[in-house]
């Protein structure tokens, strides 16, 4: 089945130690998104890629970076995780930015910072 | 930016009951989606419904774009319906989804 896959499902890291979360998709969608979701809150968009074009949200901290080496894969790099970065990180895809598109979410990676 | 309000914030139902979840938005939209987030955190797309009415099994949704609201109906609720329901919208000026704060639904056996 076509889907959005995130690995790992749970990630534990140490304060200040770089961590990378991964997302892959078999939907062949043009757009890939990264969201951060903290407990009892709505998902917050960090950035998205339209093909290779990177679009950062204005309030996304510099500590968060992303890479999309090809259509299928997208990575979220947290350079120096702080305790406040503990959250669920959700990857999503959509066919396009314009038109009647829907977003499809992966299962998420829950990040714990010690 | 566009504002999205969902109500009620919390809902407790007995299994088998029906419910209506509401989403109000502050501006015209060209995209509106309902999502269900299960207790494990997975967000599932339920409906893409910027206008009109759709049905999928026990779930249906109606968006009245001119009055800037959408309703999600759950009939004969089951315990597996528990979780958080998000409404998310986008308008022509901005392709990004704006999420409401969600409605937490608990269905008790």
Image (spheres, coloured by chain):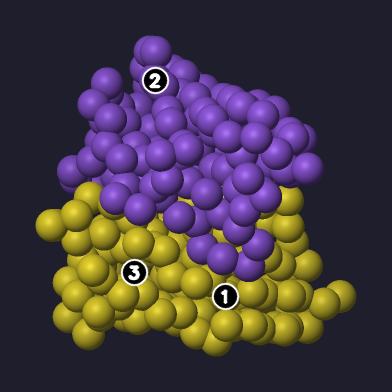
Task: Decide which of A62, A74 is in the foreground and name it.
Answer: A62
Residue under the image location 73 percent in, 83 percent down: B13
For label 1, the residue is: B103
In the picture provided, is A9 more to the left or to the right than B47?
Answer: right
> In the figure, B95 relative to B57: above or below?
above
Image quadrant in which you'd find residue A51: top left
Frontmost of labels 2 and 1 is 2
User: In the image, residue B68 lies at what x, y percent?
Assistant: 25, 80
Where in the figure is residue B81, as x and y percent of width and height? 68, 65
In the rendered structure, the residue with mark 2 lies on which chain?
A
Can marks 1 and 3 be said to lie on one chain? yes
The quarter in which the N terminus of chain A is drawn is: top right
Residue bearing the label numbered 2: A68
Residue at mark 2 to residue at mark 1: CA–CA distance: 33 Å
Q: Are discs 2 and 3 located on one and the same chain?
A: no
Q: For the residue carrying disc 3, how many other residues have a C-alpha within 10 Å: few (<14), some (14-19), or many (20+)? A: some
Q: Nearer the viewer, residue A85 or B41?
A: A85
Which residue is depicted at the point 38% across and 13% down?
A70
Disc marking residue A57: none
Q: Earlier in the sequence, mark 1 or mark 3?
A: 3
Q: Which residue is disc 3 drawn over?
A: B53
Label 2 element class: loop
Closer-to-camera residue (A101/B18) = A101
Chain depicted in purple: A
**What residue lies at 58% left-to-right and 43% top-to-bottom?**
A89
Left or right of B20, for residue A19 = right
Which chain is disc 3 placed on? B
**Which residue is farthest left?**
B93
Chain seen in yellow = B
């Amino acid at each position: 089945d076509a889907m959005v896959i995130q690995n790992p499902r749970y990630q534990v890291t140490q304060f200040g130690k770089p961590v990378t979360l991964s997302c892959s998709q078999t939907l062949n969608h043009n757009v890939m998104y990264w969201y951060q979701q903290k407990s009892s809150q709505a998902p917050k968009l960090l950035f998205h890629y339209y093909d290779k074009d990177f679009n950062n949200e204005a309030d996304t901290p510099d500590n968060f970076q992303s890479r999309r080496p090809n259509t299928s894969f997208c990575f979220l790099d947290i350079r120096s995780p702080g305790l406040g970065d503990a959250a669920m990180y959700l990857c999503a895809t959509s066919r396009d930015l314009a038109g009647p598109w829907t977003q499809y979410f992966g299962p998420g990676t829950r990040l714990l910072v010690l | 930016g566009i504002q999205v309000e969902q109500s009620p914030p919390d809902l407790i139902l007995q299994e088998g009951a029906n419910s209506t979840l509401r989403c109000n938005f502050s501006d015209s939209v060209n995209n509106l989606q309902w999502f269900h987030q299960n207790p494990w955190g997975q967000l599932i797309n339920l409906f893409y419904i910027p206008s009109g009415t759709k049905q999928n099994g026990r779930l249906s949704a109606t968006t009245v774009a001119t009055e800037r609201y959408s309703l999600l109906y759950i009939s004969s609720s089951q315990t597996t319906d528990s979780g958080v329901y998000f409404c998310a919208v986008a308008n022509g000026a901005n392709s990004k989804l704006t999420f409401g704060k969600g409605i937490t639904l608990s269905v008790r056996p």
